[in-house]
Amino acid sequence: MKPQQFVLLVISLMARLCLAQFAPAAGQPGSTALRADSSCFTNWAKRCSIQRGLRQINLPDSGFANVGTAAGAEGPAASNGVVSLGDGGIATLTFDPPITNGTGFDFAVFENTFLDTFLELAFVEVSTDSLSWARFPAKSLTQTNTQTPGFGFTQPTKINNLAGKYRHPYGTPFDLEELAMMSNIRINEIRYVRIIDVIGSIDSTIGSKDSEGRMINDPWPTPFPSSGFDLDAVGVINQLPNLNTQITRLTAPFWFQQESETLMVRANKPGTIEIFNLRGQCVYQQPIKTQPEPSSNQIEPNAATIEIPLLLSSGSYIARFNDYSIKIIITSKR
Ligand SMILES: [Ca+2]
Ligand SMILES: [Ca+2]
Ligand SMILES: [Ca+2]
């Protein structure tokens, strides 16, 4: 290969690397955008608090963004209006029951832009206790030579793990699995989500960087009342099933899982599980050892699993363990 050909080959390979890109705009093949009316959303943020940012971070006299109130981010997308965060402003949303790491995306953030390429971006962080936070690894491959102006354009294919990637009424989805290695949160118990406006200046003394240290080139400056990220809503896809069930499971010495017809026994002292028929006859006995203490990142206590013995016919029974009794109903054919 001649030197000139080699140089061309290297340039070609570099160009391909530079084109490395992420999911495209809503409606295009491969897009991850989720419509607000999708059945995947099971709940919405119900409480929000706001810490506004300045309209222009390097001009203290510019005042704070002031469009909307925290209530704008509460409830379903396209309800209650929006709230503008300003440069570096923060919205903190509370979830009860908590968001959990289920299959695929677990929640989505909605901004109010109406164009596929007029994007205002924000970092997304999650927390179990509101003290310790983990940030989704944001990536911005937008060029950083020329500042994107206040009403300039950004390609969604250059953006990953930043809220605001998709136009309204589409949400940008996030998968808690990506934070599985973070030890300061429990990805199966996310009670708080925080949205932090990207300060879009490419000046490294005031701008925001992505997870790999690149400046994020985002529309800037935006010295007007609706400055910065305009948060509409945060939709929940995967949440813990039922808080009451959860509390029962945390406090009860044992419970019955109807789907699998198994008894789950949490023994903090040894004992014997006994099953009685409705005539008071004991039809099954099983000794249970003390279960080990749960680890710090575990939501539910450790529990022994007791398969209901096959000799029990379908019908109602009373299960007892250490002076605690529950009624169980066997429905499967034996
Ligand atoms: Ca997930
Ligand atoms: Ca911004
Ligand atoms: Ca709203």
Image: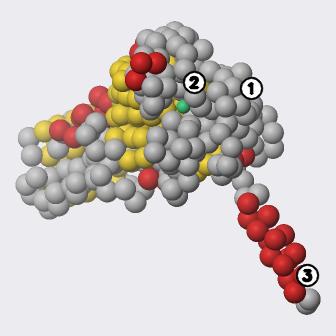
Mark 2 residue element: loop
Q: Name above or below for residue 103 compared with residue 242.
A: below
Residue at label 1? 115
Q: Nearer the viewer, residue 290 or 153?
A: 153
Q: Name above or below for residue 224 compared with residue 320.
A: above
Residue at label 2? 222
Mark 1: few, some, or many residues within 10 Å (few <14, many ≥20)? few
Residue at (46%, 40%) from the top-left corner? 206
Residue 98 position by quadrant: top left
- Identify the disc placed on residue 5: 3
Q: Nearer the viewer, residue 225 or 59?
A: 59
Query: Three-letter amino acid code at disc 3?
Result: Gln
Is the residue at mark 2 in contact range of ligand 2, meaning its CB lies under 8 Å from it?
yes
| Front position among marks 3 and 1 | 3
Left or right of residue 293, residue 107 in this image: right
Mark 3: few, some, or many residues within 10 Å (few <14, many ≥20)? few
Q: CA distance from mark 3 to mark 2?
A: 46 Å
